Amino acid sequence: MSARKTTEKPLTDEQLKILKAIAAAEGPCGSKDLSAATGLESKVISSRIAALKKNGLVESPVRCKYSVTEDGKTANG
């Protein structure tokens, strides 16, 4: 499965915060973990992750758990 290319649209502060939290985790993490790490509500996390997955920056190796793709690591800086 190939990752989709990222769009030209810049990432929001919330998306960057989520990407950084996923990257800092020792393995795939869930919405509750991300909510605790970022201070964002679970609904916001789910919405932003959907957009990050669509852009190929985040993947879900296990149901309801997320990790950063290589493109996501690049976008995260």
Image: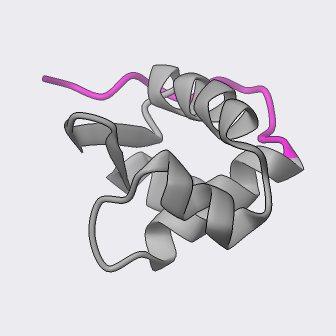
- Where does the image place residue 42, in percent across and percent down from the top left? 66, 40
Q: Quadrant of the C terminus?
A: bottom right
Which sits in the foreground, 11 or 8? 11
Q: Does residue 72 belong to the magenta stretch? A: no
The stretch drawn in magenta includes residue 6: yes
State the residue in front, 3 or 65. Answer: 65
| Quarter holding residue 62 | top left
Visible in this render: residue 17?
yes
The residue drawn where x is 28% and y is 38% is 60
Q: Residue at left 32%, top 79%?
A: 26
Q: Residue 55: x percent and y percent?
A: 52, 26
The answer to whether residue 74 shows anywhere in this view is no
Q: Is 29 drawn above or below residue 69 in the view shown?
A: below
Q: Which residues are magenta?
A: 1-12
> For this rendering, which residue is in front, 43 or 24?
43
Asked if 38 appears above or below 62 in the picture, the reply is below
- Residue 22, x across and y down, in percent: 48, 63
Identity of the residue drawn at 22% across and 34% down: 63
The x, y position of residue 7, in whole percent, is: 64, 23
* Quadrant of image for the N terminus: top left
- Res 50 quadrant in image: top right
From this viewpoint, which residue is outermost toward the right? 13
Q: Residue at x 47, y 41 (%)?
A: 57
Q: Main secondary structure of the magenta part?
A: loop
Give the answer, above or below, for where 44 lies relative to 7.
below
Image-based side of 1 in relation to 48, left or right:
left
Labels in figure, total: 0
Along the viewing direction, whichever of 59 and 77 lies nearer the viewer: 59
